[in-house]
Every structure is written in structure tokens, then in C-alpha cells.
Image (tube, rainbow, N blue to C red):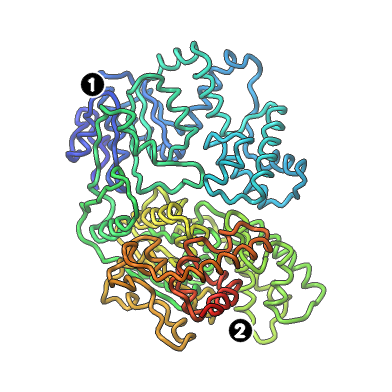
Amino acid sequence: MLGMAGERGPTDLLAGLDPDQLAAVCAPRGPVCVLAGAGTGKTRTIVSRIAHLIHSGHVAAGQVLAVTFTARAAGEMRTRLRALDIHGAQARTFHAAALRQLRYFWPRVVGDEQWELIDGKLRLVGQAAHRAGLGPERETLRDLASEIEWAKASLVAPQDYPAAAVRMRREPPVSAEQVATIYAGYEELKNRARQLDFDDLLLHTAAALEEHSVVAEEFRERYRCFVVDEYQDVTPLQQRVLDAWLGRRDDLTVVGDANQTIYSFAGASARPLLDFTRRFPEAAVVRLERDYRSTPQVVSLANRVISAARDRPAGSRLRLVGQRPDGPEPRFAEYDDETIEAKSAAARIRELLDDGTPLSEIAVLFRVNAQSEVYEQALTEADIPYQLRGGERFFMRQEVRQAVAALRTASTGGPTGELPALVRGLLAPLGLTPDPPAGGTARERWESLLALVELAEELTEAVTGADLAHYVRELELRAQAQHPPTVAGVTLASLHSAKGLEWDAVFLVGLVDGTVPIQHADGDDVAIEEERRLLYVGVTRARTHLSLSWALARAEGGKRYRRRSRFLYGLIPENHPTARVATAGRQREAGRPMPVIRHCRVCGDKLVGTMPTKLGRCESCPSDLDEGLLDRLREWRMERSRGLKVPAYVIFTDATLLAIAEQRPADRAALVAISGIGAAKLDKFGAEVLAVVCAGA
């Protein structure tokens, strides 16, 4: 990979830049849009451009403000600027820059003592929720805090939240009206206490510049050149602050990649990046597509992942070109259950370590934090150190500690009964419902509690007569084993928390439908495409070794009802064993072949896109829809949604009902083969749906 420019000093600033990087660095002052793919050296390009503008006399160092989205990225930028002998240019996160400005201008804008900045929202959200008649469940409060953060980032006021939630298809933990009430109560409590949250830093900074011309003039005299990294992740609130900083000027460089937009749930949007040339028609646009991070084999797979995306805007159609020597082909593997998948990953990691790959250069990436436990256990058993990024160790999670405490207390009373059922019953009051929540922290809590039940099932199979006391001792031993001294280790991280990082070897695990893409994204093409981008981000974290795997069952000996992720179709080499249908367990259960739909059932062409895959036919091919069946399915769904007091789409989306009415499944195997119908919905609604289908046969 190209070295850092600072290694050669400021007089040799442009040496070693490729032609596209050079074009970005040397673009004249004014609006510049750098579309930078993963691994293309964007950070080097950014700092080299700042240094070039300063050394060329276009701007003084103290007049530059560069902003990004993480403190780590801002710190790296400052380090590289110092290496280029640039001192005085500011490189900060949006929030850090706003805090600095607000503290400076506060006496003139507000006039009294500065308000306290709070670390988090939970305490005040809890008070507002209590006033609204809600209980103190921590998971609900965390989800409410997240909704308030989304609303403020999206410039949605409390009174506008219900309409915005419907428009944006939010899934709040309580009704939208209750969220609005709690949101308003939170703001009232916070303002009364003369406190600010992190969102307020941006809101008040924008207001100070918009409403006080003297403040705006002083700020704009100080800062004249702006650079924004990761511009695809900007929220409406951050864009408002940026607009306030700029005023009517256009000395702005933005750098981003719409293919890596993965924070829409938090209010981020790639639209400002994609619309940059509409706002600034004279803007210089540079595309960085030479990938210096990954081998050509990894780059090829990444390109194939993202090329299958639907409705890609022109500004997102970057095609990476690998610049490194050839490396090994990505590995694909299918396993009977998650335990085998995790143990196989640990065995492969041991091979990499023996071959000289450092621990710190290996990562296991998953979609949700609840997936970490089985990998924590497998690495512990293999005596391989690890560290969790962006999440707590399994046995340190609050819900797990609460569960272990409850199980320990119950074990002293000597309860009897079948161990897994006993554990499930004891965990029910803590949130282990028969069906998983739709998403958010409640879903993560549910997954953690379910993992404890599965540990009870494993113990029952391994130890004859195992009781609750034995089980609690097993939990305590496992917890102790997972607290080694802090040392360098394999990174365990969610795909979201891996953004911006890279490793020599990456394991993408748990790649099954319902997880990647996540279940609650089904039926929403926009959400599905964000899930595809999340997989793309995961693939592009790997420099040399890349493994992709999935398991057909969750627990050892469990029914193999899962399907590999739809995003893997077309990626696996045709001669690879896993290129065959990945549903052997379901085929045997049904007693007949049950191929996963990969080609149109009308014309035979390969299917591309969410809706064609769901329907099993190209959009242009004729439909064999049973309209009477579709009407009956809609009536059934309406009755069930009323009975369960949930929106109709929570039962099944319109697209899923359409697929059922076209394909008319005759049994459970055929029903679960339809995209959007996972194990939970099959168990809950399968018999009823099949009865509706058969009623019209």
C-alpha cells in the first residue's frame, strides 16, 4: 500500500500519489467532491489536499476546519497533518467542533453561565417515561433514547414525530404518540435543569450562527476552508451545521462513498453526497477506485456484492480495482449448526496464527452483538485471546448478569424439572418471550437470554441428570474463563462497529437470511439494500484472507431450517460444495427436493433484486397470481394484526403475501423457502397460512 506522505516531508508532498489522488489534492479552491471507495487512500488524499492548499498559499492553516465522525479518525487526521508539518489546522468530530465553538460564543449568545453537558439521556428519558406512565425497563429506555437521538438528528420536533415515524417506517418501542410525549417531556426536563445533550451542541451551534450575524461573521472570518470526511454518513442536523459554517461560501471538500452508507437507522443519508453537484454545479468531482488495501480476490468479491444492489445512483457506482499482488480466494463454508461454525473459525484462526498472522490482525465480524457468545466460547476453548469491540463480553452484559443472578437464587430452592424448560421459565420474566422482538436492544436482550437456554440444552445432552445447581456452576466457570488479562487478541465486532477498520484476515459469520439481511428489513427494499451495503463493508475490511460462513441450525442437533443469506447467491464458485442448495435438512424433512429459487421460474434467467427473488420470477415475466387467495391472506392478516395489536406488516409484508399468493406453497418446506418467512414466523403463523392456501385449492 502507498506510504504516508509525511514520511517524505512537505517538500515532497505530491510524490507517490496516483493520478486520481493527485487530481483531488491539486483541485482548485472551491467545491470538490471526492468519491472514494474502500481502501483507496482517502485519508492520505484528504490530508495531502489540506497541506497542498496551505503550502500553496491558498489558505492559512488556522483557517482550515476538517470534520469527521469518530474521534479515532479525527486523531489520525491530526497525526498525519503534523507529519506533513501542518500545525494549526483543526481536525475534529462534528460534536467536538461544535462544543468548542459553543463554549466560545455562549456568553454573547446566551449571556449567562454555560449549561452542563450530560453524558447520556437515560436518566432524563426515564423520568419523562415515568411521567408518561411507562415502567423503568432499561432496554425500553435505551430504545426511547435512540429514537430521540434519531429525531433530533433528523430535525424532527416532538410534535412532528408521529407523522415522521410513519413516513420513515420507524419501529419505536412504544406507540409513536407515546414517544412524542416522552420526547417532549425529556426536552422540558433537560431545559429546566439547564443541561445540554450532544445533539444540542449541534442544534445550538447552528442556531447561534443562523440567528446572530455578528457571531456568524466572526466565525466565517476565522474558518474559510472546510473538509468533511465520510460525507455519506451526514445527518440533516450535521448538514444544517455545515451550511451555517459555510454561509454563502463554497470552499468545501467532501469525501465519501455511498456504497458504505450503513447508518440510515440513526438519521444518516448519502443524499447530500449524491446531490453535491446539483448544489454546486461547478464542483470538481474525482473518483478514487484504486484499492491499495485488499488483494484482487477480495476486491473482486466486494465488487460483485455491491453490483447486485438495486437502483444504485450514479454517484455510488464505484468499481474498485485491486492494486496488491494476488492472494488466496475467499473461503465459503456451510455448517450444520453455530457451534460447529464457531469451532471451525477458531481452528482456522489457529492455522493463521501458526502461519505468522498476528492476533491483532484477525477479526470475526457478525451482524448483532448477541452472536458473539458462541465465538467467545470457541476461542476460549482453543486458548486464543480475543477482545470485543463495540460490545460487552457476554457474561458482563446486564441482561446476562441479571439472568445468572436469578438462576443462582432459584437454584438454592432446589426446583425440579427438565433443565432447559426450567431455565426458559425462569428467564421469561426477564424478557425471554416465545417470539423475538422486532429489533433494537430488546431483540439483543432476547438473543442473549435465548443463548442461556441453549447452554442449558447443551449441558443436558452432555451430563446425565444435570440440574439447575449444576447449570449455574457451569455458567460461573464459563464466566471466569472469559476474563483473561487484557492482551492483544482476535477482534470480535459487529459489522457496524468494524466500519473504518481493516485486518489481514476477516471472518464474516452467521450469514443467514433473517440475520444478514436482518429479519425486520424484509419487505423494505431500502432497508434490504442497506443490509447489502453492510455486507460490502464487512468484505472490504479484509486485506488478504476472507472467510464467509453460515450455519443451517442454531443449536447443536437442531432442525436445519435456515437459508444462507440471499446476498451470497452468485458469489460462491459454481464448483464449490456450498454452491448447491443449502437446505438439505429441509429437503429431507419435506421428503422431496426443495431448491432455493435462484432463477426465474418462468424464463429461467438469474434473479436480481429483492422483489424478483421473493416472487421467484423476473418483474417482466407474467404473474400467476391467485387474486382470491391474496384477498383471503389479507383478511387473515388483518384479523391477526388486530388480535395481536400490531401493524399488519409486522405479521407479513404485502410483498410476502404476494409471493405466497403466486407460489401457493403446499407445505412448511415450500412456505419457508419464500423470502421473508423465517423460523419464528413459520412456527407462529405457518399452519394458519397453509390452511388459508389449502382452503382455496
Relative placement, left or right, of 97 versus 598 is: right
Relative placement, left or right, of 509 versus 634 is: left
Which residue is pictured at 42% across the width and 49% down the height? 499
Q: Can you see residue 169?
A: yes
Badge 2 amino acid: Glu
Circle 1 residues within 10 Å: few <14, some 14–19, many ≥20? few
Which residue is pictured at 52% across the width and 24% down the height? 205
Badge 1 amino acid: Ser
Residue 225, how many percent across, how many down? 35, 23
Which residue is pictured at 39% across the width and 75% down the height? 596
Relative placement, left or right, of 129 versus 333 is: right
Q: Residue furthest right?
A: 413
Which residue is pictured at 30% across the width and 32% down the height? 277
In front of the other: 562 or 47: 562
Say which residue label 1 marks. 56
Q: Which mark is residue 461?
A: 2
For the residues bearing labels 1 and 2, Cβ distance under 8 angstroms: no
Residue 485, how many percent across, how many down? 54, 58
Q: Residue furthest bottom?
A: 591
- Examine the image and state in which quarter residue 59 appears: top left
Q: Is residue 282 above or below residue 291?
A: above
Q: Residue furthest front?
A: 628
Q: Of helix, strand and loop, which one carries label 2?
A: helix
Q: Of helix, strand and loop, which one carries label 1?
A: loop
